[in-house]
Amino acid sequence: MITKGPILVTGGAGYIGSHTHHELIARGYSVIVYDNLSTGFKNAIHPKAQFIEGDILDHSKLTQAIRDGKISGVIHFAASLIVGESVEKPLDYYWNNTAGLMSVLRALRDAGSQVPFVFSSTAATYGEPQARLIT
């Protein structure tokens, strides 16, 4: 178990992010949820989690949250994921998903934080699977 500092969960008020941070807390980790609540819900945030309302594209706020939080790791769920909407607004999705990821990585660098990083992505990235489990 990582014990030196909390785990930062970007997009932690969304469906998968909330389930993940609830499980982390159940396993004894401290958690910082960083979410802009554009598709997530404040009531999905565990009462023991520290919550910071912010956008991953707000570089200075995110960098400060990382620096102040003295985090031990990051789980990144703050991506847009509605397929139909992504076809209608491809630039919005590109900006949030690509520039957003880069913003998180830059904030980690600028905060001087070298911690484990988990990037979550949809299995749709790999197309139609040939087998039930994707390696």
Image: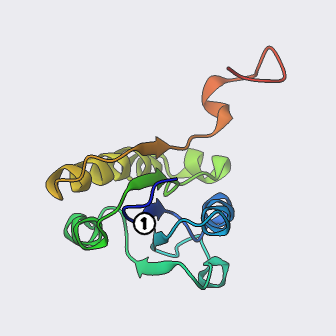
Q: Is residue 56 above or below residue 116?
A: below
- Residue 120 is left or right of residue 103, and the answer is right
Q: Is residue 73 above or below residue 127?
A: below
Q: Is residue 55 above or below residue 101?
A: below
- Give the residue furthest to the top: 130
- Give the residue furthest to the right: 132
Name the image quarter holding the C terminus: top right
Q: Residue drawn at (65%, 46%), measured in percent from left and top?
A: 83
Which residue is tagged 1? 6
State the image quarter where residue 132 is shown. Answer: top right
- Residue 102: where, in percent of width, then height? 30, 46
- Residue 6 is left or right of residue 63, and the answer is right
Closest to the observer, 111 or 123: 111
Determine crowd level at label 1: few under 14, some 14-19, many 20+ residues with C-alpha closer than 10 A. Answer: many
- Residue 114: where, in percent of width, then height? 26, 46
Closest to the observer, 35 or 109: 109
- Residue 62: where, in percent of width, then height? 28, 67
- Residue 34: where, in percent of width, then height? 43, 70
Q: Residue drawn at (67%, 33%), measured in percent from left and top?
A: 124
Q: Is residue 28 above or below residue 113?
A: below
Q: Residue drawn at (18%, 59%), measured in percent from left and top?
A: 111
Count of marks placed on residues = 1
Closest to the observer, 8 or 100: 8
Q: Residue drawn at (72%, 23%), measured in percent from left and top?
A: 134
Q: How is the image coloured?
A: rainbow
Q: Please, what is the three-letter code of the amino acid marked with disc 1?
A: Pro
- Residue 76 is left or right of residue 83, and the answer is left
SS at mark 1?
loop
